Image (spheres, rainbow, N blue to C red):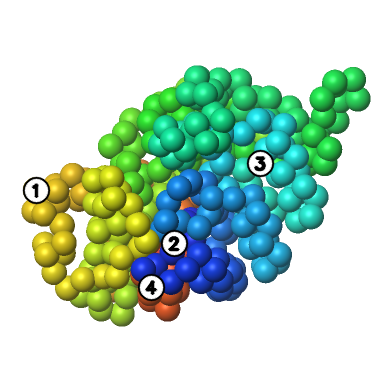
Amino acid sequence: MHYSLLDLSPVPEGFTAADALSNTGDLAQNAETWGYHRYWMAEHHNMPGIASAATAVLIGYVAGLTSRMRVGAGGIMLPNHAPLAVAEAFGTLATLYPDRIDLGLGRAPGGDGMVMRALGVHPERAEQFHAEVGELRELLGPPQEGRPVRALPGEGTEVPLWVLGSSLHGAQVAALLGLPYAFASHFAPQMLEQALEVYRRHFRPSASLDRPYAMVAINVFAADTGAEARRLRTTMQQAFYRLRTGKPGKLPAPVDDLSSVVPAGAMPALDEALRISAVGDAAQVESQLRGFIDKFAPDEVILTGQIHDHAARLRSFEIAAQAMQRLRRAEAA
């Protein structure tokens, strides 16, 4: 089983976007040595704590710093962009970095209504998602000399497309188009099992994929002790609470007492949203990852985790990679 990494280029409190982007480059280079298969970044807009808004640009940066690991979008919010523009951008990336670029596609706006207006996006664009994914696949597919509009560069690159989702809609689109499917279980796990069942049951083989291929996202907060790992997790818990209450900001520092910054009444919803998380020392994280893999039977897992301190973030992903390597060896045996 492949294990991959999702990085939002978080901007910690006390630091800048330049620091965040530098941290992304450092993490990506380390992730390659730790055996991560893919390194994905996601499109978010108007978020002080996330520096990955210009996702295609950042993918080029990371691909240039690495040599083997696949690099891609997890994902590009397709309603924000014309399919031709996406095909040209990712076709260019695939031309520069052959057989290393992935293109995950979502139908959410990646921001609120004001962001959509600033981007010139009409809300109805989301209803065209299925058709636009198909159009994008054609633009990146074999050259068609008679086609009036072509992605140049782009056509013939066959950039692998993924459908992303946190509901049944994405599962249905991925199944009908015969594409791999990635579920955003790291922050919206409510429909995970149902979406995987729908995707697998309705999957139609395509030229790019002959059987279902599902990826599940898991938060990881790993440290040398369980207590430190739980403390690291308070950063993401605070950030998620602030986002849910309309007060997004830079990534907060961890706290010893979460109840001092997050009301007790907010914790049940927070715990539910972030329940697909592995938290603890190496043995605890390995056990929890095994439990998620046994329960959901993904073809691949993608690990993520919003951690304030860069060194602690590196250590967390290193421990997680070691855990996944042990699980892979056990499975092979």
Q: Is residue 257 left or right of residue 241?
A: left
- Sequence order check: which comes first, mark 3 or mark 2? 2
Locate residue 55 relative to residue 137 in the image: left or right: left
What residue appears at the point 31 percent right and 80 percent down from the top-left corner? Answer: 224
Cα–Cα gap, marks 1 and 2? 27 Å
Is residue 206 positioned above or below 112 on the image?
Answer: above
Asked whether residue 7 is in view, the answer is no
SS class, disc 3: loop
Residue holding disc 2:
10
For the residues marked 1 and 3, what is the alpha-carbon distance in whole angstroms? 43 Å
**In this orientation, does residue 72 appear?**
yes
Q: Are marks 3 and 2 in contact (CB under 8 Å)?
A: no
User: Which residue is the extreme one toward the right?
Assistant: 145
Q: Position of residue 220 (x, y in %)?
A: 35, 62
Q: Which residue is mark 4?
A: 14
Look at discs 2 and 4 and give the one toward the viewer: 4
Q: Tell me residue 12's x, y (percent).
A: 39, 67
The residue indicated by pointer 1 is 265
- The quarter holding residue 70 reads bottom right
Query: Which one is in front in this view, the residue at disc 3 or the one at disc 4?
Result: 4
Q: Are marks 2 and 4 in contact (CB under 8 Å)?
A: no
Q: Secondary structure at mark 1?
A: helix
Q: Amino acid at mark 2?
A: Pro
Label 4 crowding class (10 Å Cα cut-off): few <14, some 14-19, many 20+?
A: few
* Residue named by callout 3: 160
Question: Marks 4 and 3: in contact by CB < 8 Å?
Answer: no
Percent from the top left, x then y, of residue 4? 51, 57
Amino acid type at image mark 1 = Gly
In the picture as drawn, the residue positioned furthest to the left comes out as: 264
**What amino acid type is highlighted by mark number 3?**
Pro
* CB-based contact (under 8 Å), mark 4 and mark 1: no
